[in-house]
């Protein structure tokens, strides 16, 4: 019996991110190898303790001293996050915006300049302009679909290029490989907010980016029941700097939320396949509806960057935006007529959500700026859930009939 147990220990201990190659296997096993010398939990326990006892004054017993600095449940999540993004390192934060804040405060200083895609989550632009500019950082927004717009905006003090692709909310695509090349040539860092694609469909680090960032609140957790953020990267020096600031600033995720995100990741591959399948059907339905003016979905052949999306993503994800023909009043009527969809901010959960960017997620961007980017009053964004596709389309159809 003892021999059997030891054999099993050896077997389970051999599971590591390095020895596992396929996404779904890593998403289920990395960070949760059962420790058979202890209780052998198959799922990682939620270590709620804020502090850890030690025997010797100067040496934490198992490397843990205080949960802001590190925590076994967070460690498990960070290992898994690194594994699913094929990254060497990952760090987990209390929100996507906390991850962004720690990233910028760790790597930039007063007087530094950032070039950012002009179509970004409204909260990211609010963070940049209303918070970080106060500390002497400078941001320039460009339409990064044209790589030359990025190159043209480089200044002596430019240190970072910040992109989303697909963007929130207009699903614009930029060329991660080409932009990363420019950044390298000018010794700048490329940060990709990979929230909309998820690590299942896009791996920015493999395309040359330095940092991949996520709001884990969205697809990675996938059940609309926790707020969190993550940074994945390969550079050890930058990782150590970020790890220092994660502790020094303190915007860490809670062990309970870490547990939820670990559990969410286990079904990420299955969920993303279904999100995409449903989204394709919804995009085609909307595109063929006479009351719909325009559909924004990179999986449609009519999307101006469909080919680039196909090249750098392995799937098109579940986010769609669209405009109806009859103005704000009718858009509001449509939004208030859906029944299966919840009219709510956020995205990436199993349930279908719908929202109005100009009045909700992107309301903090001045109207003239919004219009310049293309966020009109008729624009609506949907996060297609994994419910039965017939029910999803029936709900959209009945709401369109009310317009
Ligand atoms: O909400 P939080 O976990 O802090 O993540 C911020 C964030 C960062 N990046 C992208 C691309 C995002 O979409 C978000 C959050 N977005 C929404 C809440 C939304 O409804 O678009």
Image (cartoon, rainbow, N blue to C red):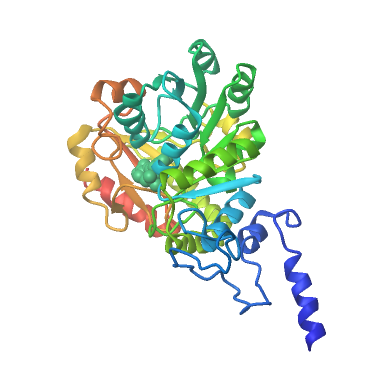
Q: Is residue 13 left or right of residue 87?
A: right
Horizontal and vertical percent position of residue 156: 51, 11
Out of 64 and 311, give the one closest to the viewer: 64
Out of 242 and 367, give the one closest to the viewer: 242
The total of numbered circles placed on residues is 0
Horizontal and vertical percent position of residue 129: 32, 26
Out of 104 and 26, give the one closest to the viewer: 104
State whether residue 229 is above or below residue 27. Answer: above
- Residue beneath the point at 43% across and 63% down: 50
Horizontal and vertical percent position of residue 147: 55, 18
- Residue beneath the point at 35% across and 48% down: 346
Q: Report the quarter where the C terminus lies.
A: top left
Q: Report the quarter where the N terminus lies.
A: bottom right
State whether residue 205 is above or below residue 35. Answer: above
| Residue 2 appears anywhere in the view | yes
The picture quadrant where one finds residue 175 is top right
- Residue beneath the point at 60% across and 16% down: 186
């Amino acid at each position: 019996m003892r021999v059997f147990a030891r054999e099993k220990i050896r077997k389970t201990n051999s599971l590591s991110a390095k020895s596992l190659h396929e996404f779904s296997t890593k998403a289920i096993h990395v960070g949760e190898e059962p420790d058979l010398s202890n209780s052998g939990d198959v799922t990682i326990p939620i270590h709620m303790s804020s502090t850890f006892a030690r025997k010797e004054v100067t040496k934490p017993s198992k490397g843990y001293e205080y949960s802001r600095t590190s925590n076994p449940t967070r460690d498990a999540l960070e290992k898994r996050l690194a594994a699913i993004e094929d990254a060497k390192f990952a760090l987990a934060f209390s929100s996507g915006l906390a991850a962004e804040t720690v990233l910028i405060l760790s790597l930039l200083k007063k007087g530094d300049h950032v070039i950012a895609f002009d179509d970004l989550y409204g909260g990211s632009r609010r963070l940049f302009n209303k918070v970080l500019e106060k500390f002497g950082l400078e941001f320039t927004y460009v339409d990064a679909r044209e790589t030359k717009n990025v190159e043209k905006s480089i200044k002596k003090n430019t240190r970072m290029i910040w992109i989303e692709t697909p963007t929130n909310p207009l699903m614009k695509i930029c060329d991660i490989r080409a932009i990363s090349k420019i950044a390298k040539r000018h010794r700048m860092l490329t940060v990709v907010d990979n929230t909309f694609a998820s690590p299942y469909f896009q791996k920015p680090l493999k395309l040359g980016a330095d940092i991949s960032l996520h709001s884990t609140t969205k697809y990675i957790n996938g059940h609309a029941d926790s707020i969190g953020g993550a940074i994945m990267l390969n550079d050890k020096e930058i990782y150590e700097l970020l790890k220092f600031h994660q502790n020094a600033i303190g915007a860490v995720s809670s062990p309970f939320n870490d547990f939820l995100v670990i559990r969410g990741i286990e079904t990420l591959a299955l969920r993303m396949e279904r999100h995409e399948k449903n989204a394709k059907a919804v995009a085609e339905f909307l595109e063929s509806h006479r009351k719909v003016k325009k559909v924004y979905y990179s999986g449609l052949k009519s999307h101006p960057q469909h080919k680039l999306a196909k090249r750098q993503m392995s799937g098109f994800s579940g986010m769609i935006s669209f405009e109806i023909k009859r103005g704000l009043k009718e858009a509001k009527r449509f939004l208030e007529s859906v029944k299966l969809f919840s009219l709510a901010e956020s995205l990436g959960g199993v349930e279908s959500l719908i929202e109005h960017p100009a009045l909700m997620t992107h309301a903090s961007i001045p109207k003239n700026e919004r219009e310049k980017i293309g966020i009109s009053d008729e624009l609506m964004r949907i996060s297609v859930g994994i419910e039965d596709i017939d029910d999803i389309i029936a709900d959209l159809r009945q709401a369109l009939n009310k317009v």
